Image (cartoon, helix red, strand yellow):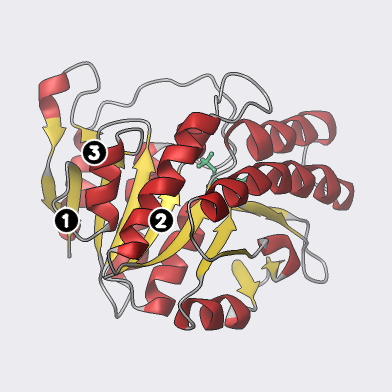
Amino acid sequence: MKVVVKLGGSLITDKAKPFTAREDIIRMAARAAGKSIENGSQILIVHGGGSFGHVVAKSEIELYGELRGSSVPPVSEAMMELNNKVMKYLLEAGAMAVSFPPHSFCLNSCSKGTYSCYFEPLLRAFSLGLTPVTFGDILIGEDGCRPSIISGDDLSLILAEKVGAERVVFATNVEGIYRDLSDPLSLITQLRLHEIPKILSEIRLSQTSVADVTSGLPGKLMKIYRYLSSSMNKPEVAIIDGSRSEVLKKALSGGEIEGTLILP
Ligand code: IPE
């Protein structure tokens, strides 16, 4: 099975502590990916920024009111630092992982309201049976555009379409989508893509105070809806608790989803 997995920043870092990776979780997730590859899955890995990229991007915005050219080095460096850790554990786990930092192959194209990326080398690596690893990052702007952040969620959904993924797994630090965050019995185990807008209007949003310059779970749902509604290839999308090794392994190996499964 072709799977795109996004390892969320809240899963692989401690979002409350700047520059703190959860190395035990990264090691476990890397082993789960390694096992699934052994079992025949073709995996493309995307990771988030957590207390690395988000913290630096937020402090740049606080200092200057916006991201500027000079924000690119510190934000991209923070992301490279986290990416190095992810890469180290993937290689240790036997995955033929190869890193593709978006700041080196994408531009922020503000006139088109999108990103312009040269994905060919990454796609070629995937088709050769390697495991590409990319991440949410800061992008230099095209002529007349400021830098912007591309989130790992966007990259996951864009790449899922490009590689014809059958499944996209969002490995997060929660069990899935809850109708009511204060009620553990309200986990939504399965829903259809077209139900997302209705569910979004019902979800009670929780206030979060930690640094996140992209979005939380509702933002993720909205993106899933937007991208997949206009996509030719409609993979199933799973939102799972990535800190549970068995849950992650099953999700990456094409097995049953424990969490929220969104069907086309
Ligand atoms: C953000 O990526 C990257 C930067 C802020 C540079 P994501 O938006 O995918 O990160 P998480 O998963 O929410 O932490």
N-terminal label among 1 and 2: 2
Circle 1 residues within 10 Å: few <14, some 14–19, many ≥20: few
Determine whether 32 is above or below 157 in the image.
above
Which residue corresponds to the image point at 59% horizontal and 30% vertical from the top-left? 21
What x and y, as percent, mark residue 222? 35, 50
Disc 3: which residue: 201
The quarter of the rendered structure image containing the C terminus is bottom left
Is 212 on the left or on the right of 127, as rendered?
A: right
Secondary structure under the numbered disc 1 in the rendered image: loop
Labels 1 and 2 touching (C-beta < 8 A)? no
Q: Quadrant of ligand 1?
A: top right
Q: Is mark 3 within 8 Å of ligand 1?
A: no
Residue 108 in view here = yes
Circle 2 residues within 10 Å: few <14, some 14–19, many ≥20: many
Disc 1: which residue: 255
What x and y, as percent, mark residue 1? 26, 70
Disc 2: which residue: 34
Identified by mark 2, the residue type is Gly
Which residue corresponds to the image point at 40% horizontal and 78% vertical from the top-left? 163
Residue 99 lies in what quarter of the image?
A: bottom right
Q: Residue furthest right?
A: 70
Is 128 on the left or on the right of 80, as rendered?
A: left
Which residue corresponds to the image point at 58% horizontal and 54% vertical from the top-left? 135
Residue 112 in view here = no
